[in-house]
Amino acid sequence: MRGIFTGLAALALVMTVSGAALADDDGGDIAKGKKIFARCKACHTVEEGGPDRIGPNLHGVFGRTVGTKEGFKFSDAMIQHGKDGLVWSEETLDTYLEKPAAMVPGTQMAFPGLKKEDDREDLIAYLKSETGAE
């Protein structure tokens, strides 16, 4: 009987560690975020040195001033938000991803947004894992 409990405890530990590997420190699920990012791939890339598309490459986005990625032509509205001091963080991305046009009126990003908080959290976890965030 003791062997069964030890085996179950070991299995629970392995499952906990495996689950933690798929989530970031804030609870977002990286695997789910990757699936959500599939909708973003037509316009954005995440790998270091990746190309800009309709939207900028997102590598290094965390901590970057809005509208300042070298080599990408942003809307005047996005540039102005950067001049006003807006910097991309988990919090600002969460707000932006909920409804981009509400946060940056005049943005060229046509994406309507992610209404579900869990979807935004998962996408942000994925972006953190793929864009060189610290």
Image (cartoon, rainbow, N blue to C red):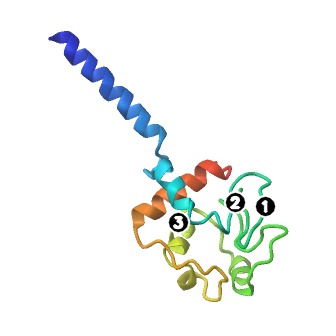
Q: Residues within 10 Å of mark 3 (few under 14, many from 20)?
A: few
Q: Quadrant of residue 124?
A: bottom right
| Distance Cα–Cα, label 2 vs label 3 | 21 Å
Where's residue 104, x and y in %?
Answer: 61, 83
Query: Are the residues tagged 2 and 1 within 8 Å (C-beta)?
Result: yes
| Distance Cα–Cα, label 2 vs label 1 | 7 Å
Q: Which residue sits at x=68%, y=80%? A: 81
Q: Quadrant of residue 74?
A: bottom right
Where's residue 77, x and y in %?
Answer: 69, 86
Return the residue at label 1: 51
Nearest to the eye among marks 1 and 3: give it.
1
Q: Quadrant of residue 68?
A: bottom right
Name the outermost residue toward the left: 1
Return the residue at label 3: 91
Give the vertical position of 27 relative to 95 (above or below). Answer: above
Label drawn at residue 133: none
Q: Which residue sits at x=56%, y=69%? A: 92
Q: Secondary structure at mark 2?
A: loop
Where's residue 36, x and y in %?
Answer: 51, 60
Q: Residues within 10 Å of mark 2 (few under 14, many from 20)?
A: many
Query: Are the residues tagged 1 and 3 within 8 Å (C-beta)?
Result: no
Q: Amino acid at mark 2?
A: Thr
Label drawn at residue 45: 2
